[in-house]
Image (spheres, helix red, strand yellow):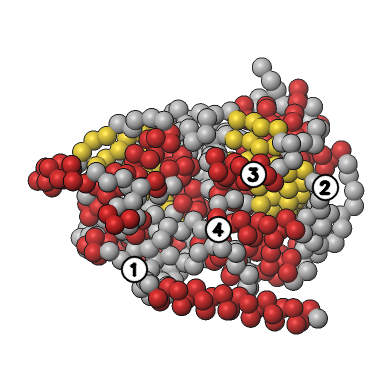
Amino acid sequence: MTTFSSLGLAEPILRALKEEGYENPTPIQAQAIPELLTGRDLLGIAQTGTGKTAAFALPILHRLNAAKRSRKPRSARVLVLAPTRELAAQIGDNFEKYGRHMGVRVAVIVGGVRPGPQVRAMAPGVDVLVATPGRLLDHIGERAISIAETEVVVLDEADHMLDLGFIVPLRRIIKHLPAKRQNLFFSATMPKEIGALAGDMLHEPAKVSVTPVATTAEKVRQRVIFIEATRKRGLLADLLADKNWQRTIVFTRTKRGADRVAKSLVAAGIEAAAIHGDKSQNQRERTLEAFKTGNVRALIATDIAARGIDVDGVTHVVNFDLPEVPEAYVHRIGRTARAGNAGEAVAFCADDERGLLKDIEKTTRQSIPTEDRRDAAAAAAIAAAEPERRQPAGRGGRGRNGQAPSSGRRDGGRSEGRSEGRREGRSGGGRGQGTARPADQRGQSSRAAGDRRQTPTPQGANENTAGLARLLGAAPRPHSDERGEGRGQQREGQRESQRDGQQRRRRRSRTA
């Protein structure tokens, strides 16, 4: 059996691994580390929870140890790009943990916090810089960071980083990098079109894949429950009443949907809290800490959290809304059954989400067991009308008159993924994420309005709500982006572009 010592890693790294209790590398680590030690570019594909971070962190630390050199002000020898703040913080922690005996200096640069401390952290120079693209571009524009001499560039969760909302900022960042560098792409999923784009950016890369693309973890027990959208919250509360559901992550499609679900669960006497891009960094950190310590049993999250949450002992994952991108399903359920443990994933499927379910089963090459908990009369009516409903749905189909299926807007707005980049850039004082879309929550369907009915408050729920408020801090900011659809959205996008342009011109004038 392969061991870390047999891979030829430096002694300080092996000592840190031993202190952490790590002896044998995972398959992705055993295949990737030897390739990276030779200096090759690499495209690595492995499921969430298989040790991708160590697969690139360990050989990078070995390289830094073998070729020590003085740090240059405002510079970094290694740049790691991550799509979310949580994932960036997790990667930074791992570099510090594995390099504790090397004196490695690590900085994490993300949006949602004041830029001043980040500028001071980068002033003397660092060995490893972990950053989200928007905030990094802000600092580059202000000349607080230089990546002109960076030796290694890592894109973690590359499928998400190279999606449409991140292509423009990534290309801007690449222009500031030296031509000669080592490039690493790692991801749990790699759609073919994204893989082709990654291939254009990598130079003769080694390719490592330990699982087929979009394969779910074997130890995750999956099931689908057919249920009306208006009854999803009640069903979720019933499931969470089971004490065996000790630590659960619930995924919704939108930020507002996450807030609604969390509020309804708290009203039902269940310790729950939401985490999404509208929360401040401090709120997100407090919520995650409460979830890790058990003060919160149910964490309600949007898809951005699927890329960064690293919490041990997650027993259940619930897809409250099915994702519009099938590969996101793999990331979601990958939050449970980590490190060889077993877990359960439950997906709620309303009638207009059947197409999304078919896309997921096709992409993951499996048939997921189902059970029907719909109202009997409603289920019979739907079954009778089924022959008339068989229009393709989900990501690959269109409804009548060429319109997209309605599931994407049911919960009050767009999904959050691509808009996170723009918000993360704005929080850093100006520059957004290129083509990333504005914030979601633009308009509500009649079904979402019906789903807002109040849940009766049981005795003791008020005390529970107050306790969570004290634990997690101030209530979330009110949503200011619910302005409707159509021309209103276009005008808001134009105003946003004008503001970005004005800010860039002011920066250039100050620099001049």
Q: Residues within 10 Å of mark 3 (few under 14, many from 20)?
A: some
Residue at 41% over, 30% down: 365
Q: CA distance from mark 3 to mark 4?
A: 15 Å
Q: Which numbered circle lies on residue 344?
A: none
- Mark 3–mark 2 contact, CB under 8 Å? no
Marks 4 and 1 sit apart, C-alpha to C-alpha, by 22 Å
Residue located beneath label 3 in the image? 198
Mark 2, Cα crowd under 10 Å, few <14 / some 14-19 / many 20+, is few
Against 456, residue 205 (above or below) is above
Which type of secondary structure does the marked residue at label 4 adopt? Answer: helix
Using the image, tell me which numbered label, if any, was put on residue 180. 2
Cα–Cα gap, marks 2 and 1 = 48 Å
CA separation in Å, label 3 and label 2: 17 Å
Q: Secondary structure at mark 1?
A: loop
Amino acid type assigned to the residue bearing label 3 in the image: Ala
SS for dot 2: loop
**Which is more N-terminal, label 4 or label 3?**
4
Say which residue label 4 marks: 165
Query: Nearest the camera: 467 or 370?
Result: 370
Q: Determine whether, in the image, residue 268 is placed left or right of residue 500.
A: left
Which residue sits at x=50%, y=73%?
Answer: 493
- In whole angstroms, how far apart are the C-alphas of marks 2 and 4? 26 Å
Give percent across and percent down for residue 472.
46, 62
Q: Amino acid at mark 1?
A: Gly
Query: In the image, is residue 444 above or below residue 223?
Result: below
* Residue 112, position as x, y percentages in the image: 58, 65
Q: Amino acid at mark 2?
A: Lys
Residue 22 visible to an observer of this rendering: no
Categorize mark 4 by other alpha carbons within 10 Å: few (<14), some (14-19), many (20+): many
